Image (cartoon, rainbow, N blue to C red):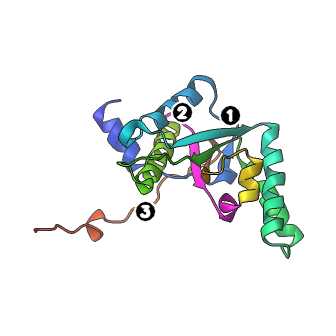
């Protein structure tokens, strides 16, 4: 990718709300490139403290049932409408990539640094998706901390669900987000 295209991609990075993500979802070579991009994330010690679960097709509706049950377990007073909204969330886009944090024992790489590696891997996937013409958004919520739900998803005891990327083809233009001035949050330390 020429320098100018790389700069443009980074500066134009944006989320596409899940309700605007339609078929086709990334698949085949495009999905492989998105997953390869994750593997290029900074990973001190080569620990690969993360893994991913792909959810698509009929599995999206099944995940919606699990989301609704998770909400009901956490909030028994949740209304029918709240449960339906929760049930609908996974089906708003044609592909979900669940982000699973799997910290590794290391004397040299603290857990927080491993968590940042997962964040970088997720961002790399989003950038690659955007470069290929797809949209994505990183979602999470209280459901990610629900041990019942993570057990249903097959996570190990030490693993945590840190959210999921919803991906698909944008059905509307979501570019043009107003960015802040970086110098508002930058100071120079002179010692």
Figure quadrant of the C terminus: bottom left
Q: Dot 3: within a 10 Å radius of its alpha carbon, few (fewer than 14), some, or many (20 or more) residues?
A: few
Q: Nearer the viewer, mark 1 or mark 3?
A: 1
Give how far apart the Cα atoms at labels 1 and 2 are: 17 Å
Alpha carbons under labels 2 and 3: distance apart: 29 Å
Q: Earlier in the sequence, mark 1 or mark 3?
A: 1
In this rendering, does residue 42 appear at all? no
- Relative to residue 17, is residue 182 drawn left or right? left
User: Which residue is label 1 attached to?
Assistant: 24
Residue at screen point 78% across, 44% down: 60
Cβ atoms under marks 2 and 3 closer than 8 Å? no
Quadrant the N terminus occupies: top left
Find the residue positioned furthest to the right.
Answer: 80
Residue 58 appears left or right of 169: right
The part of the chain drawn in magenta is: 131-146
Q: Nearer the viewer, residue 97 or 145?
A: 145
Looking at the image, the residue that sits furthest to the left is 191
Asked if residue 185 can be seen in this view, the reply is yes
In front of the other: 113 or 68: 113
**Alpha-carbon neighbours of circle 1 within 10 Å: few (<14), some, or many (≥20)?**
some
Callout 3: SS: loop
* Real-space CA distance between mark 1 and mark 3, rounded to the nearest whole angstrom: 28 Å
Say which of marks 1 and 2 sits in front.
2
Give whichever of discs 2 and 3 has the lower sequence position. 2
* Residue farthest along the top direction in this orientation: 29
> Would you place residue 71 above or below residue 139 in this image?
below
Q: Earlier in the sequence, mark 1 or mark 2?
A: 1
Q: Which residue is mark 3?
A: 178
Question: Can you say whether 176 is above or below 75 in the image?
Answer: above
| Residue drawn at x 36%, y 65% as measured from the top left | 180
**Circle 2 residue:** 35
């Amino acid at each position: 990718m020429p320098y100018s295209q790389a700069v443009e991609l980074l500066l134009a990075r944006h989320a596409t709300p899940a309700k605007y993500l339609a078929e086709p979802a990334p698949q085949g070579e495009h999905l492989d490139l998105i997953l390869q991009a994750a593997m290029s994330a900074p990973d001190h010690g080569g620990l690969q403290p993360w893994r991913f679960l792909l959810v698509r097709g009929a599995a999206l509706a099944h995940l919606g049932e699990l989301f609704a049950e998770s909400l009901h377990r956490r909030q028994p007073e949740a209304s029918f409408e709240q449960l339906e909204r929760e049930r609908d969330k996974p089906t708003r886009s044609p592909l979900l990539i669940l982000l699973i944090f799997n910290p590794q024992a290391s004397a040299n790489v603290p857990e927080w640094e491993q968590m940042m590696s997962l964040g970088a891997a997720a961002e790399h996937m989003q950038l690659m998706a955007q470069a290929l013409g797809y949209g994505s958004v990183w979602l999470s919520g209280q459901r990610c901390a629900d041990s019942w739900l993570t057990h249903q998803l097959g996570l190990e005891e030490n693993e945590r669900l840190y959210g999921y990327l919803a991906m698909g083809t944008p059905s509307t233009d979501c570019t043009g987000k107003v960015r802040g001035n970086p110098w508002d949050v930058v100071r120079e330390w002179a010692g």
